[in-house]
Amino acid sequence: MASQSRGRGYNKGYIPKQCQLQEDIYVCSLGRGRSQITRNINPIKGMENCNTPTVDSKSINKQLPNLPEPKITPQPLIDDATREWLNKLRHTWDIWKRSEVLTIALQDYFSSVPNPYLAVLNIIKNCPGQIKPKLLPFVIMEEFVHFMQDKKHLYSFHLTSEIKTDAFRMMSKQHRSVLIKFGPTFELVSDKKLFLDDIHSLIKEGLFKEACLGAIFLRLHDQFTIEDFLVPLVFQNVLLIVEEFLAESVSHQLALVKFLDELLSSRDISSEVKEISERLNITNVHSSTLYYKPLSSLITRFSKMYNLSGSCCPALTKKKRMGSLNFIINKRYRDKSIGIECFREMVIEAVGSAKEVQLELVILLNSYTEVNEALYWALKFNLPNEELPYKVRCLKEVKNPENGACSLAVNENWDLEDLRYYTINPSIISVIDTEQSTTELLEKCLSGHSIIGLNAEWDSTTSKLVLLQIATSDRVYILDLLALENYKLLWQELDVRLFANEDILKLGFGFDRCIPLLKHSLPFDNIHLENFMYLDICLLWKQIMKDYKIIFNHPGEEESSILSLSMLLSLCTGCSLKDDQSYSNWELRPLLDSQIMNAGWKNFWKGLKTIQMYKVYSLLIVYKYLKL
């Protein structure tokens, strides 16, 4: 006899031929025709000796592997009446889902039982599925919460420690919203220390996320260390929950950042991570997020998020300082792109008060054979003589370095030995940083000029403009935006006479990138910086080279594919652009003389040569038109 499911496999079951003479019972589970057939063979009388296949169950058991016994969670016993009522409730749910009929049935049931707290837990445990919004257990819990809103005082004596513990164990392994939504009804926070053992059990099971969420909900931050679940969650890259926990505990913020900083300082981070994972029984470790770069980014992120000082992460601070120091030294001695003043200013900012980095600076300079400069910094930082490199100690004994004078003289020769750089007279540069100096700018600069050059300098870290340079054919004006940002009258006059004046053509080399920064840096909304008659030198240069065959006086760099201001200057004059202040800190006040000169002559040449190029190109256009 064969009993088959009425699914898509109905009447398609297979009955073996050798079993057709027996009273075989084939039991198929309800489904879609995919269940296996279970045979229950009862031999017909008189055919006991039939040569039917026999199976030795002992031999099969010997071949099977020793599998662990499955863990079956026992469901609480409910009486027959409750089981019958629950079956009817499921049937109602299958037909109507969430409905008034279901609500009335649940409310009536909770009113009829002596202990609604215990009753709802037993019902949930006997309902299939998890507590999710579109499933019956979730609806039952919601109706229970509504039922208890104005009846807590009637049933409070039924809410025992055992019921609270049972409720927490059930909710802690569900989605976090279950604990947040239904936990207050069971008043779990009032007996929060009652659940410490349960949270530790979750940690032993490797359920670090659930343990952390339970600690957050119960406000048990001070009862756990970072190694209980914060470190495992960081290793598993579950950072949002870690941040939620840290937001309420300053002590854990400091402890976790220090832990990660110590991990960053280890020589072999991957081996250290493996050892910690084995010790804390952490699985599913995201190793890709636990090497130097992402780990340092994470420490920086936590430090900024919780406003922690650099002293909390000395290893990261040292590595960052060393990275900055190597960059500065390479720019100075390998690329030769920054001058001595800018170099020393950047070194002081990068090194700070870290003695290890100060000593490393001296060692690096000594390796570049810059012994005089190394001695200058050794004296400036007052480093112990026994820690200095041999050559620096010898030089210290031979010379009498008063305030590093010998070092400065040697290095300044390096700056002055190449005289092929473009220079201008410092007297034509005016720094506009006071209300009185703005009068000169408005009366002289913007009167009688139809073409001017524009340039700007900004801070690389904040992307905030700090200097605006305006050049005419005979002068350069450097506007200190930090000093003038509150001079509303000045910017209103510049708006009318310069930015919104279509009679003045504004020229620059890549200045279009500075226009949004300029608008963002000024504290006024009515400055007109759109469509303000701007022409880019770089685009003009490309167009001239495309339309005409131009022969430069100094075509040394003509073949270069990089169109830079320095290259254009070299082609026209044979003098290079010495931009040795490109990495300077333009926010420091007062401005260095080298900074003022750099900003002045760069923009002066830009304005002067662009005016000439523009006039030449205009004549070429007229000539081409007349020729046609």
Image (tube, rainbow, N blue to C red):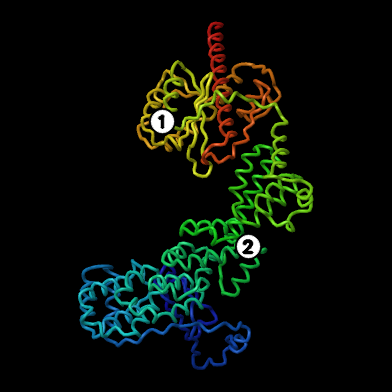
Residue 407: mark: none
Query: Could you tell me residue 329's position as x and y percent?
Result: 67, 45
Work out how far the residue at label 2 is from the one at label 1, CA to CA, in angstroms: 52 Å
Q: Secondary structure at mark 1?
A: helix
**Quarter holding the C terminus?**
top right
Which residue is drawn at the image coordinates 59% and 17% (left, top)?
A: 547
Residue 435: mark: 1
Mark 1 surroundings within 10 Å by alpha-carbon count, few (fewer than 14), some (14 through 19), many (20 or more): few
Which residue is drawn at the image coordinates 48% and 82% (left, top)?
A: 71
Left-right relation of 312 to 418: left
Residue 265: mark: 2
Q: Nearer the viewer, residue 446 or 323?
A: 446
Q: Nearer the viewer, residue 164 or 483?
A: 483
Left-right relation of 592 to 201: right
**Quarter holding the N terminus?**
bottom left
Query: Could you tell me residue 337's position as x and y percent?
Result: 66, 37
